Amino acid sequence: MKQGTRAIVTLGVASIFALTVGMSTAWANEPGYGHGGGGHSSMGGHGSSMMHNSTGQLIRHLLKNEKDIGLTAEQVTKLKEMQLNLDKTRIKTEADIQVAERELKALTEEEKSDLGAVEAKLKQSADLQVGLRMTSIKARRDVYALLTAEQRAKEKTEHEKALQQHKDAGKGYSNPHGGAMKGNPHRGGDAAQPAPPSGTYVQ
């Protein structure tokens, strides 16, 4: 019986790990914007960009290009407020997820722990992650609802321009086999980095 219980607990841990990675990746690759480097670390360090907030990237992009997009002072104020609220929600929820995961770990390490309690903790962690992604999706819709049709078109143009500039810059870096570097040689001494996936948006 102990062996069977252990197998069930192991399966439960594997399931929540898969869900954690899946939901984190879904958050990072949420429709609308790709995830960039330097994202917010979460889930006890599963990756610096795993839970990167793509809606947050969208807001930063809008604020960075507010003049080109034609944002009004009122829109800028609202976007900054939305950005703050989104960051606060993300930080708090990710902390709650880490606590739930730590509690789950403690439960699974105890062979005699109640499986009902293990299942409840699995669901708690999963529900928090679902809620986090839903918050991002809703916030993105609210952001676009704030823009006029003309501003949306300008935002798309600026975004595509930034993507193209990033791809072009990536073509100038030297290869790892000693080829000549064509890009900017003054990058603080860092080695040239390979071009990221074409769908990546970098601030």
Image: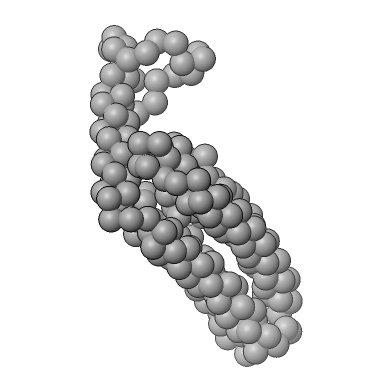
x then y, percent, for residue 32: 34, 55
x then y, percent, for residue 86: 57, 58
Q: Is residue 170 visible?
A: yes
Q: Quadrant of residue 122?
A: bottom right
**In the shown orientation, is residue 158 left or right of residue 115?**
left
**In the shown orientation, is residue 111 left or right of residue 149?**
right
- Residue name at image x 45 percent, y 55 percent: 55
Mark count: 0
Residue 37 or 79: which is nearer the viewer? 79
- Residue name at image x 45 percent, y 37 percent: 64
x then y, percent, for residue 113: 72, 83
Residue at the far front in the pictured view: 73
x then y, percent, for residue 45: 60, 50
Residue 5 or 70: which is nearer the viewer? 70
Q: Is residue 98 visible?
A: no
- Residue name at image x 58 percent, y 54 percent: 81
- In the displayed structure, 45 sits above or below 95; it is above
- In the displayed structure, 95 sits above or below 160; it is below
